[in-house]
Amino acid sequence: MSHSVSENFLKDLDYSVVQQCMHCGMCLPTCPTYDATKRESASPRGRIALMRAVADGKLEATKAFGDEMYFCLGCLACETACPAGVDYANLFEMARAETERVGALANPKRNLIRKFLLRWLFFSRARLRLVGRLLWIYQKLGLQTFVRKSGLMRLAPKQLRELEPLSPTVCNHFTPLGYHSEFRNPQSAIRNRRVGVLAGCVADLTFSDVNMDTIFVLEQNGCEVFVPAGQECCGSLHGHNGEWEMAKALARKNLDAFDVHVLDAIIINAAGCGSHMRHYDRLLEDDPAYLERAKLWSEKVRDISEYLVEIGFRKPAGKMNSKTRLTYHEACHLVHGQKSRSSRGHCSQRFRDMRWWNCPRQRGVVAAREFTTSPNPRWRRNCRRGKSSTSPPPGPSWWRRPTPAASSRS
């Protein structure tokens, strides 16, 4: 549905979506924020009740409402637990969009940060790569090490001091945009599978090696790979932070960059991005010029692990040490957002001669990781304590990338 600046995002939702919640409470044990606070308003059921009150005009989208919507981690575990099939992802995105529309959380500092990050930095790959290269120079020259060891960070604000250790290490090389493999399978007369790979935004800077592994594995499994040069951020960062129109604009740019009609699949190796990309059809439902392509795009989006299982990936020919530990982390947006649950079982079967380490509470690890950047220090402390219990046991090297065949280039 189309939204103008003056329209209420929640009032314009299909009311049956808001009414779908039965208030049964099945979502409560799965919700990280409810588990941490035991507050009804910090649960999916409580948040939906607040959204319905705003949709009915009984409640204004105030600061308290906005704080509660942004306290949600968006892990979507509640969707898996819900017997009524509530589309919580759509609800919480619209609730955040409404929060931003009325300016419930607006203040000069927050507005400046959002303008820089969402409207300037992450809206342009060229600008993002420029900042990434500057950060790379800062790290390579040893300036980051100097700042940390010299104690200069003690002069910075407390929140910046706590966030600085989390700053990512930028890769030497970014993802090769415009790449097109001419791979042909000499053992088969069947046409290659043609796939497009989305490089991502942060992943392009800090996990470009994973992107290259993704391309390599796809080629080794008979795929012709395209990495279109005109692609941008998938828009999930904007859609999840209430910038609905910007998310639409980025979706259009990606649809223009990828020729969805000739591709068999659109591959992503970041679960949160994939979850958002599967809903381009909903995002652009009010745009006739893009709707057909958006529907086709949503049908063809695949997580790399899911796609490799779908086409029957080959086991790497290289030998792995029998003492090597393997694990497979099922990201929350992969399991709950994309509804993909079969990859782990297929991978463990294919690598059954290796030692597998089962990650306890693994579906809570990623959601808990969101607490690391929470402005509330109590949540950060709880997160660190929770994460420490999920660390792997000491021993030989262990492999945990979500790309099943990427660790052995042979």
Image (cartoon, grey):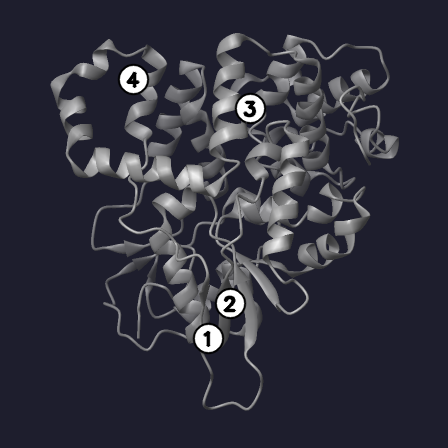
Residue 396 in percent (x, y) is at 20, 55
Q: Nearer the viewer, mark 4 or mark 2?
A: 4
Report whether 346 appears left or right of 213.
right
Residue beneath the point at 15% across and 33% down? 142
Q: CA distance from mark 1 to mark 4?
A: 45 Å
Q: How many marks?
A: 4
- Label 1 Cα crowd, 10 Å radius (few <14 / some 14-19 / many 20+): some
Q: Secondary structure at mark 4?
A: helix
| Of the image marks 2 and 3, the number of the one nearer the N terminus | 3
Q: Which mark is residue 221?
A: 1
Residue beneath the point at 86% across and 17% down? 56
Quarter of the view holding residue 101: top right
Q: CA distance from mark 3 to mark 4?
A: 24 Å
| Of the image marks 3 and 1, the number of the one nearer the N terminus | 3
What residue does disc 3 label?
33
Q: CA distance from mark 2 to mark 1?
A: 8 Å
Q: In this rendering, does residue 360 appear at all?
A: no
Amino acid tagged 4: Arg
Q: Which mark is residue 161?
A: 4
